[in-house]
Image (tube, helix red, strand yellow):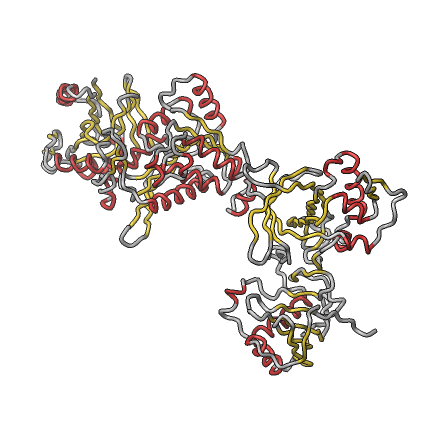
Amino acid sequence: MEQQYIEVPVEKVKSTIPILPKAIGVYNALYESPYCDNIVCFSLKTGGELISFETDVQVGQVKINDIKRTERISILFTKDDNYVPLVFALRADFPEVPHRMLFPNGWPSCLCIYSTPYDELKITWSPTAFVEDIRNWLRKTAKGELHQNDQPLEPLLLEDEGSVILPNDLKQNELLNIYVLRQSEDKKVHLFVSRKPLVGANSIPLILLLLKGKPQTHGIISHTPTNFLDLNAFLNKAGVNYIEEITEFLKKIKESSPGLLNVRLLISITLPKTREKGVEIVQEDLFTFISADGVSKIGITLGLWELFKDNNSLADIFPLPPPDKTKMSMVKIGLLKPYLYFNKQMANNLNNIKKGSDEIKIFAIGLGALGSQVFMNMCRSGFGKWTLLDDDVLLPHNLARHSLITYSVGYSKVNSLAFDANSLLNDDTFVFPIEGNIIREKNIIIQKLIEQKISESNLILDMSASLAVSRHISNDERFATKRTVSSFLNPTGTQLVVLGEDKNKEYKLDFIEVCYYRELICNKELYNHFEQSDNDVRYSASCRDLTSRIPQDNLALFSALTSKFLKEFILHESAFATIWKLDEMHLCISKNDIPISKSFERKINDWTIIYDESFLNKISLLRKNKLPKETGGILIGTYDMERKKIFLSDTIIPTDNSEYPTFFYRGIGGLKTELERIRKTTSNMLTYVGEWHSHPKGCSILPSRDDMKLLAWLSNNMSVEGLPALMLILGDNNTFTICFAE
């Protein structure tokens, strides 16, 4: 049987020698190739050129796809060279394989040689390589190697009449509003479909027909349907009898919704795809068509109804005639490239969010510049379910660094953020806003709402940059079982601090905070951490109306780091403390992880003394190095007077100590300078909190008479400032006693 071919349906002028630059190059490459023959070039009425040839294909004994040893190929070149030359396999029975572009019926199979955009491809494109790429496409397709197992199923490249943006959850027979967004220079129309009428916009009513095919392997669709006859053939392959579907659909509209007879059809078709027959569905392709005519005209054209012109009524034709191919081809449809509304699932997918992460419930406090940007980063990835708490409104100066824009000025930050986020994800449950204050909320209803949302949350995120809020969260019973993260910037906006509790809450946020202060005084590179900006800006008349000059670039960098950290942190169980530092000269960021050692508590009267292994090991080593002599120094730490807590963090050893085997006199050398440095470095958070000294080996850690005298002296001096007196006595094996007086 003679092989049948389909010629490219373009109007040829004459056989000629090519004049278009790319056509000339390909023509010469074909002549130079030992694998190509029967080369002919035609000029086209459009100004383009068509080169046809036969090429030998290296086909093995075992073939996955029916590629012949000799294939006839045509290459279509456009005059303006704005599109990649189109490659057509002319054999009429060319197999339905992946990596083909869709064209209307009557066109031969168009091979998708490249996935790279043509503007990019031009830079490295060469005629000889192009010819070999065509031959390689045929060779790999024959072997079934063109589409790799780990490669996503091919996107369909469609010759469409425009695009349409659709809701994610379309419903059968749904009456929708369609709006023209724009018309591009190539006359393609770009549409937007909405359930709700858009204020001030003119809509075109549509009635929706939803169809879903059976699972099929990718790459089986050959041509773009342009009418009902093509669409029927298109859907038959997917196991859908379109003639029956559309007939029943039109009858229901006429019987139940006669007011929709002049409404056009939007036909949405979902086609599940598999890599191979019988295996799981990998993805679903969505095809969308719009009818050129309304329902009544379609029914009349198909021969379902007859129009009585005297009263403009429709009469059913009975019995229904069999499907008429000629009539079906007269009902024109246009293919629209569909885009679904952005939603949480799409956000997860595009941001590579792990399954289940979207359900983590986060209670966020403080939605200022950093907080708002962190939140919107998380929102755009669809990460978590959020409760936002803040009592502030957006003011004009906030626009320099806040994620909200002008239309929210004067309105609640949390309410505005919730509206933007829920609208973005098309999900009213993603964010629940609470306009309130975590510390001093007076409204009982809001108080109960806060408590409810805290109890439902998996993570507390404090971005308030408020010490009061941070300490409140650490000690409020409502947060006792809730893991907490605190994120804030230093005063100049050049360093980001993130502190996070462990999953089991063994390390509380206030303790991790003290570890952070200790790192500041021990790391020379962080001595300027709390350095204040000297160029604040006044944004209103009050003495408190000052804001810092911090570049938005810094906020963007650090908000990105915070959101990336959160996504990873939630998956791990350990506590965490890190400072990221921006090097503005070299435009790079360094990371400083802060050690967190095991913490301990001692209750004395109404007070709680908190210390850790790092502190204890340091003073024990100092004692060991001085044995058999006694030694000591001053205790560095911080107070929480409201909650009666003292945190022990570090020590300073004077340079002029008097140390003996049975006696110790604490000196003063270097204390004033070093203590002043510590206070400045930590913004007065670490300071003097008491004294410590060691006892010799084998001696009791109980206080001596001299020790008690020292404690009395301390008490007299500390009471002036309203502070308790604290003295620690260290003995063997890291044992110690704490002498305390209020």
Say how many tags the image has.
0
The residue located at (44%, 26%) in the rendering is: 434
Can you say which quadrant of the picture contains the N terminus? bottom right
Left or right, 664 with reference to 295: left
Residue sitting nearer the eye, 308 or 249 = 308
Q: Name the one closer to the observer, 591 or 125.
A: 125
The image shows residue 211 at horizontal and vertical percentages of: 72, 45
Q: Residue 689 location in percent, x, y?
A: 20, 27
Name which residue lies at 72% across and 41% down.
262
Q: Which residue is painted at 73% across and 61% down in the image?
A: 105
Residue that extends furthest to the right in the rendered view of this protein: 319
**Quadrant, the C terminus:** top left
Front position in the image: 694 or 509: 509
Where is residue 103 drawn, in percent x and y? 68, 61
Q: Nearer the viewer, residue 732 or 374?
A: 374
Give the left or right position of residue 464, taking residue 635 as reference: right
Inspect this view and state whether residue 501 appears: no
User: What percent of the width, then of the height, locates residue 542?
Assistant: 24, 28
On screen, residue 190 versus residue 108, left or right, reads left
User: Quarter of the image holding residue 97?
Assistant: bottom right
Above or below: residue 138 compared with residue 727:
below
**Residue 633 visible to the viewer:** yes
